[in-house]
Image (tube, helix red, strand yellow):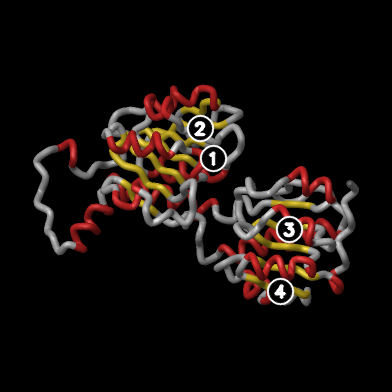
Amino acid sequence: MTVSALPPRDALTIGFAHVAYRMQDAFAARRTGIRHFEVRTLDDLEARVAEADVLVVSGLWRNHLLERAPRLRFVQSLSAGADQYDKAAFRARGVRLASGQGVNERAVAEHAMGLVLALTRQLHLARDHQAARSWRPMIGDRAIREDELGGKTLAVVGFGRIGQRLARLARGFDMRVVGVRREARPMPELADAVLPTERLVEALAQADIVALTCPLTPETEGLINPAAFAAMKPGAILINVARGKVVDEAALLATLGDGRLSAAGLDCFHDEPLPKGSPFWELPNVLVTPHSAGETRRYEENVTDILLANLDRLWRGETELVNGLA
């Protein structure tokens, strides 16, 4: 279907939809004069989506909303990941789509590095001891002491913008870095080696720490499966700031339970919020964060920058969008 033109500025209505982010405040501060509204629940979004020419959304998106939004011309995703959008349906209806890629690359990379540091320095266990008012004695067994990062190998699975920024941080701690990406090419300024995805097992076998920073796609769903865990070095650490479904959770639980993995820092899960009955909550060698890796005090401003750039491109009749997907 031919893409319909965006209404002019004085006739445009933007809908912001997110359970927490204060996009309306950030947008209003730009003084664009463009009409806008904000909703925080799926029910409210369903009730008002028909008013929107442009929708700024992520987790509240459902593909059936396309049928309820006759005016909709453009969706700016708040998130870098875009697996929730049916891109073929967008193209069929002539609705443009762009991701928020890049808005949180610094935050996600720093969060991943924070999980690496927390687990190697055992800060999660220190917090448990603090809560119990317990002064842990010095440890004679070297195998279970805190560790240092210099000289260790970090495998970064998904060597895009976030993965490359994480690699720079790791290099600052004198780590060896192996990147894994679909199209491998030498990046000596960032990594000691960059391998194609088909050589994932080779990368895993070298790694003391494995960090997942890849998008969720049909190719990456279940990528870290029993065979991948079997390839990892005994005592390795897994960090997941990608998507929960990149990892086979049953295999992860088994690997954590038998000690092959020493620890895991997990920001994302198959089911979110993580159910109260999930065994991940109680594992002492797991550090859980609530899919917060991308959160930053500048998030709304960063998304607004991309949104306004894309609106200008659409008004000029350009076909290429910042982070365009459909």
Q: Are marks 4 and 2 in contact (CB under 8 Å)?
A: no
For label 3, count other residues whose C-alpha is less than 10 Å away and answer few (under 14), some (14-19) or many (20+): some
Tell which circle, 3 or 1, labels the residue nearer the N-terminal end.
3
Q: Are marks 4 and 3 in contact (CB under 8 Å)?
A: no
For label 1, count other residues whose C-alpha is less than 10 Å away and answer few (under 14), some (14-19) or many (20+): many
Q: Residue 171 in the image: x percent, y percent? A: 41, 40
Q: Nearer the viewer, mark 4 or mark 3?
A: 3
Q: Residue at x 62, y 50 (%)?
A: 101
Question: Where 229 sits versus 63, above or below?
Answer: above
- Marks 3 and 2, how far apart in space? 30 Å
Label 1, on which residue?
214
Q: Nearer the viewer, residue 271 or 199?
A: 271
Tell which circle, 4 or 2, labels the residue nearer the N-terminal end.
4
Residue 37 disc label = 4
Judging from the image, what secondary structure is the residue with disc 1 in?
A: loop
Q: Are marks 4 and 1 in contact (CB under 8 Å)?
A: no
Residue 315, by quadrant, is bottom right
- Marks 4 and 2, how far apart in space? 39 Å
Q: Residue 195 in the image: x percent, y percent? A: 52, 26
Task: Identify the amino acid type marked 4.
Answer: Phe
Q: Nearer the viewer, mark 2 or mark 1?
A: 2
Q: Are marks 2 and 1 in contact (CB under 8 Å)?
A: yes
Residue 65 disc label = 3
Label 2, on which residue?
223
For label 2, count other residues whose C-alpha is less than 10 Å away and answer few (under 14), some (14-19) or many (20+): some
Tell which circle, 2 or 1, labels the residue nearer the N-terminal end.
1
